[in-house]
């Protein structure tokens, strides 16, 4: 996403693909001043940051603790509540962990809009929430944070805009709560069930081998959440 007319930002420039970086650099040439802003460090979002900064001289700003290994030292570390100025309105950083611990969304109050990174996707009802302790609780808390914002549209990094933000948040939350309930009920019936048993219980035989590893990590994250909230006090 590019925001601004002459003084702007590029949000999550994407993967480090040569023709893609050239195209972005060409677009950025129209700006008098432009900054590269990252929601998180996954390569499909931040991979092009270093190449694009080298090609254009733009600074790279983003959250502390970026993942991915390809992001150079940030010129500015952004924290919750920090603003990024453009000549089309300020963007406000909103710390929204869950997909990754450092994940930021960017609220554009002048347009009642949110750049959501990977907190929500433009299609479906789920995104990646696994990989670190507490990620499921973080994710539910981040969805709750979005409800407090005055939003007319959400721009996810993948897929089309979400033009009914409340319905989208409800959908993603409902999916996560359903998975939590499935795991909680399965563990109540079989307290000794391991990750593979719960993957079979939740997904049945619908998974291809290519996504089985991701499913195991997702179920492990749900198991950790349930173990820390056995009575279900945090799911409603």
Image (cartoon, helix red, strand yellow):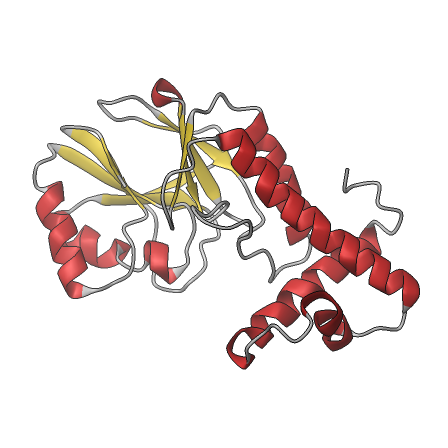
Task: Determine which quarter of the picture holds residue 87.
Answer: top left
- For residue 143, side relative to residue 19 (left or right): right
Q: Residue placed at 43% from the left, 50% from the top?
A: 40
The number of numbered discs placed on residues in the rendered structure image is 0
Q: Residue placed at 21% from the left, 64% from the top?
A: 17
Q: Residue placed at 52% from the left, 24% from the top?
A: 149
Task: Determine which quarter of the picture holds residue 85.
Answer: top left
Whether residue 107 is visible to the viewer of this picture, yes or no, is no
Q: Position of residue 152 (x, y in %)?
A: 43, 24
- Quadrant where the N terminus lies? top left
- For residue 67, side relative to residue 37 (left or right): right
Whether residue 5 is visible to the viewer of this picture, yes or no, is yes
- Quadrant where the C terminus lies? top right
Q: Position of residue 108 (x, y in %)?
A: 37, 26
Looking at this view, is 124 or 63 the one in front?
Answer: 124
Task: Determine which quarter of the picture holds residue 14.
Answer: bottom left
Q: Position of residue 157 (x, y in %)?
A: 37, 47
- For residue 41, side relative to residue 8 (left or right): right
Looking at this view, is 131 or 64 the one in front?
Answer: 131
Looking at this view, is 177 or 136 the one in front?
Answer: 177
Q: Residue placed at 72% from the left, 58% from the top?
A: 222
| Residue reaching furthest to the bottom | 209
Looking at this view, is 52 or 164 the one in front?
Answer: 164
């Amino acid at each position: 996403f590019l925001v601004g007319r002459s003084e702007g930002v590029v949000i999550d420039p994407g993967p480090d693909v040569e023709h893609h970086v050239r195209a972005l650099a060409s677009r950025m040439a129209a700006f008098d001043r432009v900054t590269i802003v990252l929601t998180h460090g996954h390569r499909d979002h931040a991979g092009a940051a270093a190449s694009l900064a080298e090609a254009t001289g733009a600074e790279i700003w983003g959250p502390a603790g970026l993942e991915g290994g390809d992001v150079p030292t940030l010129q500015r570390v952004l924290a919750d509540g920090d603003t990024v100025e453009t000549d089309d309105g300020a963007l406000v950083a909103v710390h929204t962990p869950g997909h990754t611990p450092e994940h930021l969304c960017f609220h554009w109050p002048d347009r009642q809009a949110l750049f959501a990174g990977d907190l929500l996707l433009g299609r479906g009802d789920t995104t990646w929430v696994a990989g670190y302790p507490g990620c499921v609780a973080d994710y539910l808390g981040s969805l709750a944070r979005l409800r407090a914002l005055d939003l007319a549209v959400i721009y996810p990094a993948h897929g089309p805009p979400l033009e009914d933000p409340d319905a989208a948040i409800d959908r993603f939350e409902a999916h996560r709560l359903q998975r939590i309930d499935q795991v909680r009920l399965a563990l109540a019936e079989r307290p000794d069930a391991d990750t593979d048993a719960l993957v079979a219980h939740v997904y049945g035989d619908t998974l291809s081998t290519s996504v089985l590893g991701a499913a195991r990590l997702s179920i492990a994250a749900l198991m950790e959440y349930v173990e820390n909230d056995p009575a279900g006090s945090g799911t409603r």
